[in-house]
Amino acid sequence: MTRPTVAVSAPGKVLLAGGYLVLDREYTGLVFGLDARMHVLVQETPTSSGVVDPEIVVRSPQFRDAEWRYSYKETEDQGGFHVMQLQGHSTTAQTRNKFVETALGYALSYISAQSSTMIGSASVTIVADTDYYSHPGSTDCTNPTRFVDFDVPLTEAHKTGLGSSAALVTAFTAAVLAHFLDQHQLRLDSELGKQRLHNLAQAAHCAAQGKVGSGFDVAAAVYGSCVYRRFSPSILEGLGEVGSSRFSERLKILVEDLDPSKQWNMQIDKAGAGLPRGLRLVMCDIDCGSESVGMAKKVLAWRKENSDEAALLWATLQKGNEDLARELLQLANERTTVSQDYKNLSDTILTIRFLIRKMSAKAEVPIEPKVQTELLDACCRVHGVIGGVVPGAGGFDAIVLLVEDSALLPLQRLLDTYKRTSNDTKDGPAIGKVRLLGVKQDFEGLKFEEAEFYADWTR
């Protein structure tokens, strides 16, 4: 049976409000999807000569030597599919891609529990929109394209913090499911299909990371912009590893929410996320990046040791975050064509930043480090820039700004010549050119694409 060629994309994300708080179910996060997307194309292919078992070849052609070849075998006692990276191919990356490998194992294991379909060989192409990575120079203005050749190994690419791993796992999982399963078995454009994709992608992403995160990034990749309350981490307890006895059965129960004692309880409120007409979300990359996992551990350790103080601060922050979402939604619903008064919105953002810096100082974690404070303050002095934050876990990733359309050109002029007022490296790493990313908010989540769109990258 011939399998269809499938192309899927999933959006990146920015957690505008709710950093750290979103780790706890008592609190929520305001997350916006971005029009920077991860794209995955799956095509049926014959098995390579000399290879006994079927294989799946995964390529990321924007990077050097980014090719991974996998064989796979169904394990005994419903243990799911064990995925093995093949070595010895001259064009094959010798390093593991844990997100691709884990997502593939989980997807194939779920398919095996869902259907008796024979799984054959396939070619998978991964393409990322430009703004997921910091890169020097610019594209050729005489021949502009959506995708660029980053011309570096994947391990040397600097991420901008837009949620590439969650978008990749989600799009990859969706494309593999849509390729190998018939539509009557799973329709990813239905609410039920999205729920199951969400559950499977969350499980795979957590396994690849080696920890159970809040999941807001995967939720945004599936559903787009929303107000998010996390699922209980205990839902994933007892799942085990691919290859363990009856893993595929447990995975099916988890994905299809069949265990009454472990019901998925995340809350995804798409109606709660809005932006007024004439206001857009933009991001500025400083090409540094930070280790959010280590920062989160320190913040949570401070919270545990100072529970009363932390509870008061987090409750105040939650109120500020709710005020921000409410103000944005109220402005969005006014449907006016004249310039709006954004003072309340600006004041709310400043309050949130003050509270974040307070938590940053107490936990001794650079959530809004001085270099970012200077950059945010400089940007906010541009007429039409309403406010901005260091999103998510903070640190040295790209900052996010809410700006009126009219502010884009003067903001770009500022960033073209921006230099720190202080070069003291104890306040953070030195930053060079600040780049205004081309991304903006996107309320749509996962979507199917036309395969022909990627022809230049599949040759």
Image: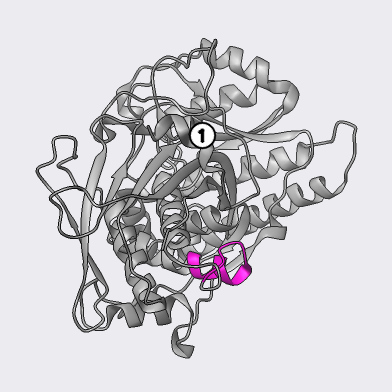
Q: Viewer-proximal residue, 356 or 1?
A: 1
What residue lies at 73% left-to-right and 42% top-to-bottom?
345
Res. 269 visible in picture: yes
Q: Is residue 194 magenta?
A: yes
Vertical relation: 118 (above or below) 360: below
Q: Is residue 234 visible?
A: no
The quarter in which the C terminus is drawn is top left
Where residue 322 sits in the image (x, y, percent)? Answer: 66, 57
Residues rendered magenta in the picture: 186-197
Whether residue 200 sits left or right of residue 268 in the image: it is: left
Where 411 falls versus 404 (above or below)?
Answer: above
236 falls in the magenta region: no
In this view, the residue farthest toward the left is: 88
Q: Nearer the viewer, residue 282 or 380?
A: 282
Residue 234 drawn at (x, y percent): 38, 78
- Where's residue 12, x and y in %? 51, 45
Kind of residue at disc 1: Ile
Residue on which disc 1 sits:
399
Q: Nearer the viewer, residue 70 or 452?
A: 452
The location of residue 8, given as percent across then percent down, is 51, 49
41 left or right of 91 in image: right
Density class for disc 1 (Cα within 10 Å; few <14, some 14-19, many ≥20) is many
| Count of picture labels | 1
Q: Residue at x 63, y 26 (%)?
A: 380
Examine the image and state in which quarter residue 243 appears: bottom left
Residue at 56% x, 53% y is 446
- In the rendered view, tell whether residue 246 sits above or below residue 402: below
- Quarter holding residue 381: top right
- Which SS class for mark 1? strand
Q: Residue furthest bottom?
A: 260
